[in-house]
Image (cartoon, helix red, strand yellow):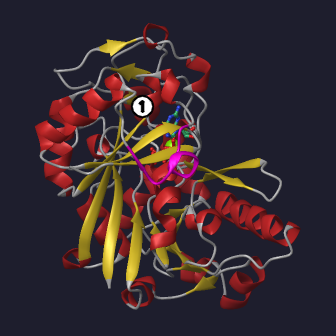
Amino acid sequence: MSACAVVGGQYGSEGKGLIVGHVAHEFSGHVRVGAANAGHTLYTRDLVGEYHKHVMQQLPCSVYADPSAVAYVGPGALISPDIFEAELLTLREFYAGRGESAPVVVVDPRAHVIQEWQVYKEQLSDLAERIGSTSATANEGIGACQAARVMRDSGCVIAGHYWSESEAVGMGFELGDVPAAAWEHDALLLEGTQGTGLSLTTGHFPYVTSRNTTAAGLCADAGVAPTRLDRVILVCRTYPIRVASPNGGTGTSGPFYPDSEEISWEAIGVDPQSERTTVTKKVRRVATFSMDQIKESVMLNGATEIALTFADYLDPRIAGLSSSSSGRWQSLVDYPDVERAVESVQEATGVPVSMVGTGPRSVLDVFIR
Ligand code: GTP
Ligand code: MG
């Protein structure tokens, strides 16, 4: 088995859903970990050309991007049962509407199911106020569930105890050993969540999330041995974002890198309404690109390639350009601002930029030098 990890290079919302959707067909198995505070957005196009938007908080994007692949929820995942069950229902309805059967979904029985007491515990904590935790404001209890797991709290409930085998089948999934099943795939995709800057141990404490979001953390949560990884795609935005500050001010959901500057959406000609978090719907903070952050993220993840998303923020003329509409490989010569950005990232990191995101539904495969 060889595995590819897709990870965020900044503070999340880099467009991992877009990139996973673009490469999905190359993998027969997809593993998602993390929790519902990450929302991966992807679009499918139906036979009459109409787009359908899917925001995936628990299941891998492959369930829409490549339904022939097996979708796994790894042992490190934390599951919000209502969100997970709703996602499964939507999935079944989507495929039933097309007269097709839904893809196979396997959940590791060791994944934890978030309990109501954990939601209350997190709401009562000062997390949301202190660090702008999205999980605490969105009533998800993710940090509290993870903390309870670390403490082996007697109130923890794992997936294998929460759902019986027959309940699972009735809802459209199976309980099974994900690391063992993943091992059998020739090509496996690990779908990372959030961003490297939010990683628990190497991020800017305390403005971090409750787990390690790097490729190494992803391997551990998926139950995939690190020696299996031969490709790590680091997804980076042209303008990194952070979640909104706890009290509507600036600065308190954590710092940006010193070689970047916090700016307004208006300054880069972007409607702030379009930059609300997928899950909590708050307008994000934004900054100029930090090369120091990308260099550090390349190091922490061992990135083998970079996907640079939101190129349409550098040059709106590139918006919507995709490999399918323009032939597979694309030169950026007509878009000098984008070309310069790609070249400077490659030069500073020594890592090729293989893909460029040009809008919520479009990706270009670019020349690798
Ligand atoms: P988390 O794991 O939740 O941090 O997020 P993510 O990286 O999966 O982010 P997501 O897929 O939700 O993307 C964030 C938003 O940006 C979504 O609304 C996407 O549709 C949109 N998006 C992704 N790539 C691009 C791009 O290249 N240009 C533009 N304009 N929008 C994009
Ligand atoms: Mg998101």
- Horizontal side of residue 305 vs 186, given as left or right: left
Foreground residue, 214 or 138?
Answer: 214
* Figure quadrant of the N terminus: bottom left
State whether label 1 is within 8 Å of ligand 1: yes
Residue 78, x across and y down, in percent: 49, 63
Residue at coordinates 35% horizontally, 69% vertically from top-left? 221
Q: Quadrant of residue 331?
A: top left
Residue at coordinates 13% horizontally, 38% vertically from top-left? 347
- Horizontal side of residue 125 vs 169, given as left or right: left
Residue 85, x across and y down, in percent: 71, 65
Q: Is residue 171 above or below residue 86?
A: below
Residue 36, x across and y down, in percent: 54, 53
Residue at coordinates 42% horizontally, 53% vertically from top-left? 193
Q: Which residue type does callout 1 highlight?
A: Ala
Which residues, given as a range, are shown in magenta? Answer: 321-330
Residue 258 part of the magenta-drawn span: no
Q: Is residue 40 above or below residue 314?
A: below
Foreground residue, 146 or 14?
Answer: 14
Residue 129, x across and y down, in percent: 44, 27
Q: Is residue 262 above or below residue 166?
A: above
Would you name the residue on which mark 1 appears? 311
SS label for mark 1: helix
- Residue at the top extreme, as displayed: 267
Q: Quadrant of residue 228?
A: bottom left
Residue 328 part of the magenta-drawn span: yes
Residue at coordinates 54% horizontally, 64% vertically from top-left? 60
Graded by Cα atoms within 10 Å as few (under 14), some (14 to 19) or many (20 or more), the crowding at tag 1 reads: many
Foreground residue, 323 or 103?
Answer: 323
Foreground residue, 159 or 235?
Answer: 235
Q: Residue 124: in sight, yes or no?
A: no
Q: Is residue 286 above or below residue 174?
A: above
